[in-house]
Structures are given as structure tokens and as C-alpha cells.
């Protein structure tokens, strides 16, 4: 399915496309899905989500990463996709939401649960243990921290949390001022990071796991 995705490039590119960038044209099938991540990041997301039963993604956009997650996770699992899809100029049509749903449903067979709300609202009645959590919503540092504080307690001890746009990398688009970069550097790098540890990094992605008792 990756042939249907146009990945972000390294070095970072503006990836022009004019009017065709509008999600209406993805919904029509005129163009491929515009990913906000690189091919390497896509492959890493799929690798870490392989076989997971419960996957949660905060921030869906056109659904490129959700497509990969659904392909990789257990066919008997559930993929929860959280996004308010609130930026559409035509809410009644909302082609970003329509395009995302068409894309994600095109591969894999895991059950999909769409939660059209902000993550801070979706978490209020959450009670499902999570195997893989992808935090890619609001990139303000306070918002990233809120998602972490509210959602990470539901991640299983052997589960994984991924942060997008959370590290600097050659030719990339992130800066030291990016909210996810600031949050990850502050919480998971250095001697103070004991409860959770970084297990993988690729381009702008950072993956963390809860450390086992003997590793703290």
C-alpha cells in the first residue's frame, strides 16, 4: 500500500502541488495520500505496531500512518483513531475526514473506531489497555505533555509510545523549539529518565517503553 502514499522527503521539501494538495483530490482518487512522515518513519511505525491488539493514534490527517498501523497490527485488533477534523472550511463535507476514512479502510482488517474529538476529551472515559500509542496531535509542548500524562497510564507495561516530530535529524524539518522535541528531550534524555526509556529513533520519530523493574 505504500505505493499509494507520497512520503515527506529528506532533505525537507515544500512538496508543492497547488490546488491538488486539497484533500478533496485524495478523496476523489486523483492523487496519492500525502504523508506527514518519511518512508523510514512509516516502516518504523509498522515494525513497532506489528501484531498489536490495541493501537491508538492521536492526530490522523489524511490517514497515511493509520493505514500502515492497520496493516501491521493484529487482524483481530482494534485501531482507535482520534482527531476532531475541525479545520475543514466546509464542515458538512469535510473532505479531510472523508479522505482519511477511505484511505484507512483500504488495507488491513482490524476493527476501526473513529473518535471525532480532541484527545483531552476522548481520554475522559477511556478504560482500554493500549499496546501501541502514537502521539501526533497538537504539537504545542504543553499539549504533548497533556497527551502523555493523560494517555500513557493506559499503555501496557510492554507497550510502546511513539512521538512524531520529536527529534532533530539531518535534512529534516524539526527545530529545537518544536514542542515534541522539547518534551522528549526534557523527559526521556539524560540520567533523570528512569521510568520510561527510548528504544528506537528514526528521522523525527522517537519510541519509548516503560522500563522493567530491574532496568530502573
Image (spheres, rainbow, N blue to C red):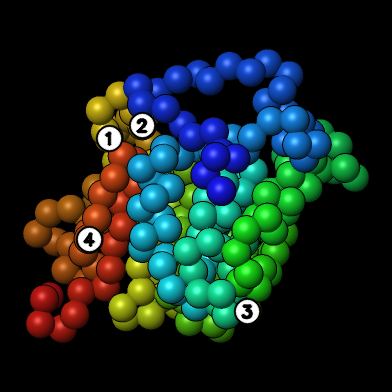
User: Residue 104's spot in the image, x, y percent?
Assistant: 65, 55
- Distance (Cα) linking label 1 and label 3: 35 Å
Tell me the element at label 1.
Answer: loop
Q: Dot 2, how many residues are within 10 Å of its Cα: few (below 14), some (14-19), or many (20+)?
A: many
Q: Residue at x 48, y 82 (%)?
A: 129
Q: Earlier in the sequence, mark 1 or mark 3?
A: 3
User: Residue 30's spot in the image, x, y percent?
Assistant: 75, 30
Tell me the element at label 4.
Answer: strand
Tell me the element at label 3.
Answer: loop
Q: Dot 3, how many residues are within 10 Å of its Cα: few (below 14), some (14-19), or many (20+)?
A: few
User: Residue 10's spot in the image, x, y percent?
Assistant: 36, 26
Q: Earlier in the sequence, mark 2 or mark 4?
A: 2
Q: Earlier in the sequence, mark 1 or mark 2?
A: 1
Q: Is residue 195 left or right of residue 25?
A: left
Q: Which residue is mark 1?
A: 168
Q: Nearer the viewer, mark 2 or mark 3?
A: 2
Q: Which of 118/60 is in front?
A: 60
Amino acid at each position: 500500500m505504500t505505493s499509494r502514499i507520497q512520503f515527506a522527503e529528506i532533505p525537507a521539501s515544500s512538496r508543492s502541488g497547488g490546488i491538488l494538495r486539497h484533500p478533496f483530490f485524495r478523496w476523489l482518487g486523483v492523487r496519492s495520500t500525502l504523508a506527514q512522515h518519511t518512508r523510514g518513519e512509516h516502516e518504523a511505525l509498522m515494525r513497532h505496531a506489528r501484531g498489536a491488539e490495541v493501537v491508538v493514534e492521536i492526530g490522523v490527517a489524511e490517514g497515511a500512518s493509520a493505514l500502515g498501523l492497520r496493516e501491521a497490527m493484529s487482524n483481530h485488533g482494534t485501531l482507535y483513531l482520534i482527531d476532531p477534523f475541525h479545520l475543514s472550511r466546509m464542515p458538512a463535507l469535510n473532505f479531510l475526514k472523508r479522505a482519511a476514512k477511505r484511505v484507512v479502510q483500504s488495507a488491513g482488517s482490524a476493527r476501526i473506531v473513529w473518535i471525532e474529538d480532541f484527545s483531552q476529551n476522548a481520554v475522559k472515559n477511556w478504560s482500554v489497555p493500549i499496546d501501541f500509542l502514537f502521539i501526533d496531535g497538537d504539537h504545542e509542548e504543553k499539549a504533548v505533555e497533556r497527551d502523555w500524562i493523560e494517555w500513557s497510564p493506559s499503555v501496557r507495561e510492554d507497550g510502546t509510545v511513539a512521538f512524531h516530530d520529536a527529534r532533530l535529524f539531518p535534512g529534516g524539518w524539526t527545530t529545537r523549539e518544536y514542542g515534541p522535541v522539547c518534551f522528549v528531550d526534557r523527559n526521556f534524555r539524560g540520567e533523570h529518565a528512569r521510568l520510561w526509556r527510548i528504544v528506537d529513533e528514526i528521522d523525527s520519530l522517537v519510541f519509548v517503553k516503560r522500563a522493567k523493574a530491574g532496568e530502573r
